Image: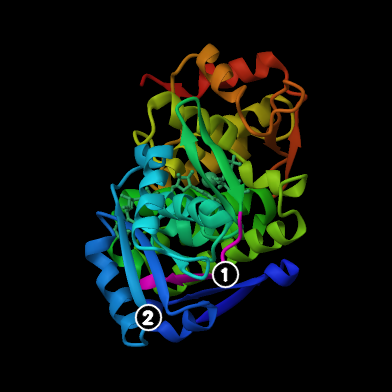
Amino acid sequence: MQTLTVDLGSRSYPIHIGAGLLHQPGLILPHLAQRRVAIVTNTTVAPLYLQTLTDSLALNDVEVVPIVLPDGEQYKTWETLNTIFDALLTHRCERKTTLIALGGGVIGDLTGFAAASYLRGVPFIQIPTTLLAQVDSSVGGKTGINHPLGKNMVGAFYQPQLVLADTDTLKTLPPRELSAGLAEVIKYGLIYDAAFFDWLEANIEKLRALDHDAIAHAIRRSCEVKAEVVAKDERESGLRALLNLGHTFGHAIESGMGYGNWQHGEAVAAGTVLAADVSRRMGLMSEAEVERVRILYRQAGLPDTAPDLGVEAYMQHMGLDKKVEGGRIRFVLLRGIGAAFVTAEVPQADLEAALTHYVQPT
Ligand SMILES: NC(=O)c1ccc[n+]([C@@H]2O[C@H](COP(=O)([O-])OP(=O)(O)OC[C@H]3O[C@@H](n4cnc5c(N)ncnc54)[C@H](O)[C@@H]3O)[C@@H](O)[C@H]2O)c1
Ligand SMILES: O=C(O)C(=O)C[C@@H](O)[C@H](O)[C@H](O)COP(=O)(O)O
Ligand SMILES: [Zn+2]
C-alpha cells in the first residue's frame, strides 16, 4: 500500500492506494466518529462490492445503512440527492454518522455534496472504484450535481476524511470506463509533468492491460499532482483551474450531447484536443505536439475529435462555465506539453476554427 497526504492543515487527509484495501477495515475505523455509517453506492457497484465492505465493517461492530442509487451521469441531480437525504433521515443518521461513497465519480460527487449539506455537514469517506475516481474525483473536495443548463453547477468544496483506493476494484471495470479514467491521467502529464506524459506514451498498453505496477504508478503520480495543486489552491482562485484543462469544451460536450451519452473522460479528451488546437493556432504549441496528444488519446481508447454541436451551441454552453469572469470565458491552454495556463485572450477566429476542424458529425 502507498499513502499520500492532502495537506490542508487541520483538514488534511490520507489517500491510501493498494490492492485488497476493501478487506482492511482497520484503515477506515480510526476515521469514524461513531460505529454507524451510511454507504452510498449504485445498482452496478452494489452487487460487486457492497457486501464485502459491509461484512468487513460489521466484523468490527460497525452498523451499515446501505443507500443504493440508480447508475448514471443522468442521475447526478437534485432529485437523486434528495433520495439520499430521505434515506439518511428515515434511518435517523446523525451528525457523527459518516457517509461513505462507494463507486465512481458520480457517486463521489453526489455523496460529498450530501455530506456537505446534511445536518449542515457530516463526515465522509471516499472509496473510489473507477480509475477516474481513483486518480481525480475522490481527491480535492469538489462535490456537486449537474443542472440541465450546465455540469456541476450546484455544489460545495467539502473535503473527505479519507480516500481509500482499492486497485483490485479496477478488475471489474469495463474497458470504456478504464479509458475514461486515462483521460484525466493524461491531463496531469499535459498540465504539470512532461516526463510523466513521456512515461504514459511508453506505457499506455500496459495501463490498458491493467498491469499492476503501471496502474499503481499512474494512480500515485496523478494523486501526487492533484494533492499538490489542491494543497496550494483549495478553492480554485488560481493554480487549481489548470485541472480544468479540456473541461470548458468537455462540459459543453457532456451537457450538449445529454448527460451520460459521452463519458466525462471522453468529453475531456475531445475537449483537450480542441484546447491544444486553439493553443497551436495562437502559436503556443507545435502541430507535432498536438499530434502527440491525439495519438496518445487514440492509443488510450479515447476520442480525438469532438461532436459537431455547432459553434453557437458550444459558445452558449461554455458561457456558463464556472471560470467565466465578467462575462468572458477563460480557457486553460497549453504552452507545449507539460505547461498550462489560463487566459481569456482567445481570438474568436481561433476558437471557431478549432470547433470546425476537430469535430465529427454527432
Ligand atoms: N469532484 C471532482 O473533482 C471530479 C473530478 C473528475 C470527474 N468528476 C465527475 O466524476 C464523474 C465521472 O466519474 P466516472 O468516470 O467514475 O463515472 P461513473 O461514476 O459514472 O462510473 C462509470 C461507470 O462505472 C461503473 N463502475 C464503477 N465502479 C465500477 C467497478 N469497479 N466495476 C464495474 N463498474 C464500475 C459505474 O456504475 C458507472 O456505470 C462525472 O460526473 C464528473 O463530472 C468529478
Ligand atoms: O478538481 C478540480 O479542480 C478539477 O477541475 C478536476 C476535474 O477533473 C473535474 O472534472 C471537476 O469536477 C471539474 O470542476 P468544475 O469546477 O469545472 O465543475
Ligand atoms: Zn474532470
Q: Is residue 164 inside the magenta stretch?
A: yes
Between disc 2 and disc 1, whose residue precedes?
Answer: 2
How far is mark 2 from mark 1, CA to CA?
17 Å
Rendered residue at 61%/60% (across/down): 159
Rendered residue at 37%/43% (across/down): 80
**What number is the disc on residue 62?**
2
How many marks overall?
2
Q: Of 190 and 220, which appears nearest the observer?
A: 220
Q: Mark 1 points at which residue?
A: 161
What secondary structure is found at the residue carrying circle 2? loop
In the rendered structure, which amino acid carries the disc numbered 1?
Answer: Gln
Q: Of 101 and 302, which appears nearest the observer?
A: 101
Residue range highlighted in magenta: 158-168
Residue 306 shows in this picture: no
The image quarter containing residue 254 is top left
- From the top left corner, tell me how far across and down residue 198 is, in percent: 59, 57
Residue 206 shows in this picture: yes
What secondary structure is found at the residue carrying circle 1? loop
Q: Choose mark 2 or mark 1, whichever is in front.
A: 2
Q: Which residue lies furthest to the left in this view?
A: 47
- From the top left corner, tell me how far across and down residue 193 is, in percent: 67, 57
In the rendered structure, which amino acid carries the disc numbered 2?
Answer: Val
The image quarter containing residue 233 is bottom right
- From the top left corner, tell me how far across and down residue 89 is, in percent: 39, 56
Rendered residue at 35%/47% (across/down): 83
Query: How is the protein colored in the picture?
Result: rainbow
Label 2 with label 1: CB-CB less than 8 Å: no
Q: Say if 254 sits above or below 120 in the image.
A: above
